[in-house]
């Protein structure tokens, strides 16, 4: 029996794969799950861990949002957290129009 030589682990191990925006959108959809969920709240740290990112840059988030929109979802920042909403669910919400505004005396 012949033993193989094992290479020592370097202190600078290779960085794990950072998924591209399409892969990030798919990962998020898998996290949200196939249930009849129409919305979810997501902490920034959750997205960073899920997507293996130290920082969520605006241009990167826009690309992820574009891919999610194609899949029927909208991702947005809601002040202190992120949220994802199924666009079909929004269609049933009440509509507000500029005709509802009243200018001058009634």
Image (cartoon, grey):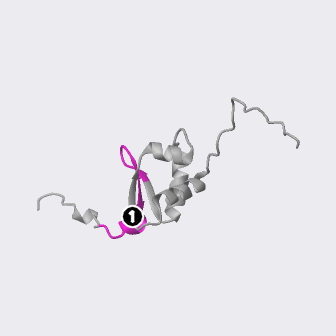
Q: Residue at x 52, y 51 (%)?
A: 62
Question: Quadrant location of the C terminus?
Answer: bottom left
Question: Residue 95 placed where, x, y %?
Answer: 29, 67
Question: Residue 55 placed where, x, y %?
Answer: 52, 39
Name, please, the residue furthest toward the left.
106
Q: Residue at x 69, y 38 (%)?
A: 14
Question: Residue 53 placed where, x, y %?
Answer: 55, 42
Give the residue number, with chain letter if any, for mark 1: 38
Name, please, the residue furthest toward the front.
1
Q: Is residue 84 magenta?
A: yes
As drawn, 81 above or below 12 = below
Question: Residue 71 placed where, x, y %?
Answer: 51, 65
Q: Which residues are magenta?
A: 76-93
Identify the secondary structure beneath mark 1: loop
Q: Residue at x 36, y 45 (%)?
A: 79
Name, please, the residue furthest toward the top.
11
């Amino acid at each position: 029996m012949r033993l193989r030589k094992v290479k020592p682990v370097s202190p600078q191990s290779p960085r794990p794969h950072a998924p591209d925006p399409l892969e990030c959108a798919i990962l998020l959809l898998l996290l949200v799950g196939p249930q009849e969920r129409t919305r979810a709240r997501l902490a920034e740290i959750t997205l960073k861990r899920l997507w293996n990112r130290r920082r969520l840059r605006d241009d990167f988030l826009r690309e992820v949002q574009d891919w999610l929109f194609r899949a029927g979802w909208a991702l947005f920042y809601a002040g202190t957290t992120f949220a994802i909403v199924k666009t079909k669910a929004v269609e049933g919400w009440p509509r507000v129009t500029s005709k509802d505004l009243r200018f001058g005396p009634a």
